Amino acid sequence: MKTNKSTIIFSISLLFCLSVFLPFVYSQSTSLKDLMVDPELFDQKEVRVSGEAIGEILQSDGGFWVNLLSSGYNLGIFSQNKSDFEDISHWGSYAETGDQIEVQGRFYKNCFQHQTTDIHMESLNVAKPGHKNSRVVSSRKVKTARLALIICFLVALMYFLKEKIWNKSSKN
Amino acid sequence: MIISPDRKDFSTIFNILGRLSVVLSFFMLIPVVVAFLKNEFSPFFDFLIGFSASAILGFVLLIVFPIKKEVGWIHAFFTVSASWILFSLLGAIPLWLSSHFVSFLDAWFEAMSGFATTGLTLIQDLDHLSFAHNTWRHLTMFIGGQGIILASLSVLVRSRSVALGFYVGEARQEKILPNVVGTAQFIWKVSFVYLILGVVTYFTILFRQGQGVEKSLYHAFWLFFASFDTGGFAPQAQNIAYYHSLNLELATIIFMILGAINFNLHFWVWNKSKKEIFKNFEIKTFLFTLFSLVLILYFSFRGLGSSLSAFRGGFYQLVSAHSGCGFTNLSQTQLLSFPGLGLLAVIFAMMIGGGVCSTTGGIKLMRLGIIFRTFSMEIKRWMMPVKAVYRDRFHHLQDLTLSDKRIKEAYVFFAFFMFTYILGALVGMAYGYPARLALFESVSATANVGLSTGITQSSMPTVLKLVYIFQMWAGRLEFIAIFVSLGLLLSLFKK
Amino acid sequence: MKYVVIVGCGRTGKELAFELSKTENVVVVDKDLKKLDSLGDDFNGKKVWADALDINTLDKAGIAEATAVYLLTGNDNLNLVVGKVARRKYQVKKVILQVGDTIKKKIFSEEGLTIVNRTYLIVEVLKKCIS
C-alpha cells in the first residue's frame, strides 16, 4: 500500500512537472529548417532559433520586423517594440554579413494577426556579430574584362569601317 | 506553297540578331553604372564582360551577315523566336559570373525566366546578391515584358512595314494604332507614365517602412518592373513576404492588374472613352473568373476553420497567379498547405492568365471569353428552330462578331496551352513529383507566372530544367513563332 | 504620327497606302474585299471592309482622329460627296480627292478641300514631254 501511494505521488508530480515544462521543451535550439519543413509540429509553441539578420528593421503591419536567414530558409521575426532589435548592428546584404542572432519566441504557422508564418519574439541576443564582406575581385576576371573590351572595340571599329567602305562603293 | 529559306534569308536573320545583340549590350551598361555607384567591384567586371560578349557577337554577326533580302514575315518570326534564346544565353553570362548559380544552366534558366517574365528562380543566396546583379534580374523582366522587338522597332528595323511581322511574332496580335511603330510608341509612353507612378508609390511605402533612401529607390524600380511586367522576381529570398507590408501588397496588386490588362484597353481609356472599362469583354471575363475562383478558394479554406486569416495570403496568390506575375507573400510551406481545391483554384487562375496584348501569359481572357460564349451560343442554337440563323456579338472596344475564324483561333490556342501544361506535368511526374505539384509547376512555367511549390530548385533534374526553359519560351511567344521557325529549319534540312 | 484615311483601294490608293504606312497611321476603306486583300496580310495599317457611303463606315475608320482623308475611288461623285461630309461633319483638316472631270473641280472647290484632277495632271505631264 505504501509503495503504491508513493508511486502515485511520484507519477503525479512527474506528470505535473512535465506539463509545466512541456511548452518549453522546444526551447532547445531548433534549426530554422526544421521549423519550415514541419511547421505543424511547432505551431504556437515556444522556440529558439538562430540565424543571420538580413536587410534592416522594417516597420509595418502593426509592429517591427527583422528577417532571419539560416541554411537557405527565411523567416520573419516580429516585435511590438523597435528597441527589441536595437542590439543588431550588422545586417545581411551584398556588402555585409549580418549578425548571427538567437531569438526566443512563439512560432506561428499561420499567424492570425499577420496571416503569415512568423515568430513573435520574446527575447533576442546577438550570438556572433557580423562584419563587412571583403569582396576580392579575381585578377582573372579583370584580365578577361580588359581583353573582352579591347576585342569589342576592335570588332566595332571593323564594323564601322566596313560600313563606310560599303557606302562609298555603293555610291560610286 | 511552303516557303523554303535560302542562304540570303538566313543572312538577313543573323544580321537582325546582330543588331539586337548590340541593343542588349547597351542594356547591360545599366548594371555597370549601378555597380560603379555602389562600389561593387566584382559585379562591375561581370557586366563589362557581359556587355563585351553581347557587343562582340553583335558586331561579328553584322559584319559576317549583311542584309541580303528585304526583311519579310519569315525573317520576323524566326528572329523573334531566336532572339529570346540568344538574349537569355547572353543575359546569363553576368549572372553566372556572380557565383550565385550552381551551373551555367541554372543561370540560363534564370535569364530565360526573366526575359519571359516568368519569375521562377534558381538563384542561391539571393539576400546577399549585389545591387548590380539584382538590377539586371529585374531589367530582364522589363526588356522581355515590353518586348525586345518593340524596343528595336523604332530604332533598328529599316523596312518598317515588316515591323508588323515582329509584333505578331511576339504574340501581340491586336494592333493599337494602325501603324505598328505608332503602337510601339504608345506602349512605351504608357509604360513610362506607369513607371513614374509605380516608382513613386513603391518608394513612399518602402521608405516609410524604414529602408534607406537609396535602397527604397532601387527596390521601387525593381518591384515596378516585376509587377507591371508581371514578372515576379523580387530582390529578396522571401519575395514579397520579406516586406511584411499589407500596403505594399495592395500596391503590387494594382500594378499587377494594370500590367495584365490589354494595352489596347489602356489606349482606349486614355484617348477615347473611359466607359470602355465597364463594357469590355475581357474585363467582364476577368471579373467572372476572378470572382468564381475567389469563391472556390473561400470554400476550400472554410473547412480549415481559419478562413479569414488565410484570406490575405490566398487572395493575393490568386491575383498574382491570374495576372501572371508570380509575387508571393507566403512561404513555400504555406503554399503547399493550401487545401487541394484551393491549390486547384490557383492553378486555374494561372492557366487563364490576363488580357491579350499585355505582359501576361496563359490562354488569355479574350480566348476564354470566346470559349464561354461559344458554349452558350451552342446551347441556344439547339433550343432554336432549325433554320434560324444566329450570330453572336460581343463588345471589345468595338462591337465585333463571334465569327468562326475567331472561335477556331480561340480553341487552337486553348489546345496548345493545355497540351503544354499537361506535357510538362507528365515530365514532372515521370521524375517522381506528385501530380498536383507537377501540374502547378508546369502551368507556372508555361503561363509565365512564377509561383512555385518547391519543385524549381537547383537540385531538380536537368531534363526538367530544360523542359521548363522550353515551356517558358514557348508560352511567352505563344507557339506560333516557334512553330514557324521549326518549320523553317525542317524545310532547310529537307533540301 | 498622322492619322490618314484612304477611301478606295485602287492602284492609286494602294500605292499611296504603302508609301504612307511607312511613317503614318493608315486606314484603308474599300467595299471590295479582294482589293483590300491585295494589300497583303502584313500591311502596316488597318483595313476596313465597308461601303464609304454607309454612315457607320467613316466612324469605324476612325475619321474622328483623322488628320487627312483621301478620296480615291473611281467614282468622282462619291469622292465629292464623302469629301464634303468629311469636311463639314467631321471637320477633317485636310481632305484630298481625285476627279477626272475639270468642270467638277471648279464647282466643288472649297476651303480645306483639295481636288486633284487626274486628267489635267496627265495632260500637263504629256505636254511637257514635247515642249
Image (cartoon, rainbow, N blue to C red):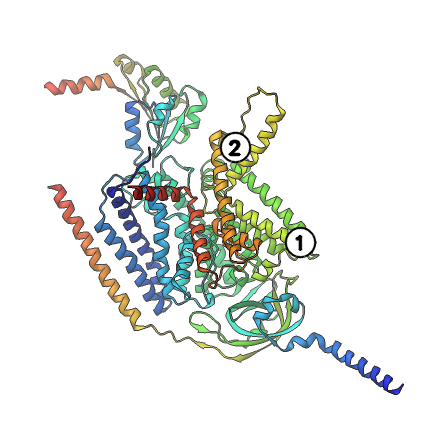
Q: Disc 1 residue type? A: Phe
For the view shown, which residue lies furthest in the bottom direction?
A2
Q: Tell me where residue B239 appears, x and y as whole percent.
A: 51, 60
Residue at 49% x, 72% y is A91
Q: Within 10 angstroms of label 2, few (less than 14), some, or many (20 or more) residues?
A: some
Callouts 1 and 2 in the same chain: yes
In the depicted view, which residue is nearer to us: A93 or B254? A93
Q: Nearer the viewer, residue B267 or B296?
A: B296
Image position of B245 with respect to A128: above or below = above
Element class at badge 2: strand
| Image-based side of B262 in relation to C19, left or right | right
Q: Is residue A80 left or right of residue C2?
A: right
Q: In which quadrant is the N terminus of chain A drawn?
A: bottom right
Residue receiving disc 2: B395
The residue drawn where x is 30% and y is 18% is: C109
The answer to whether any part of residue B397 appears in the image is no
Mark 1 → mark 2, Cα distance in angstroms:
36 Å
What amino acid does circle 2 point to? His
Side of C52 where B346 appears, left or right = right
**Residue that label 1 marks:** B301
Q: Quadrant of residue B390?
A: top right
Q: Position of residue B25 (x, y in %)?
A: 31, 56
User: From this viewpoint, which residue is outermost toward the right?
Assistant: A1
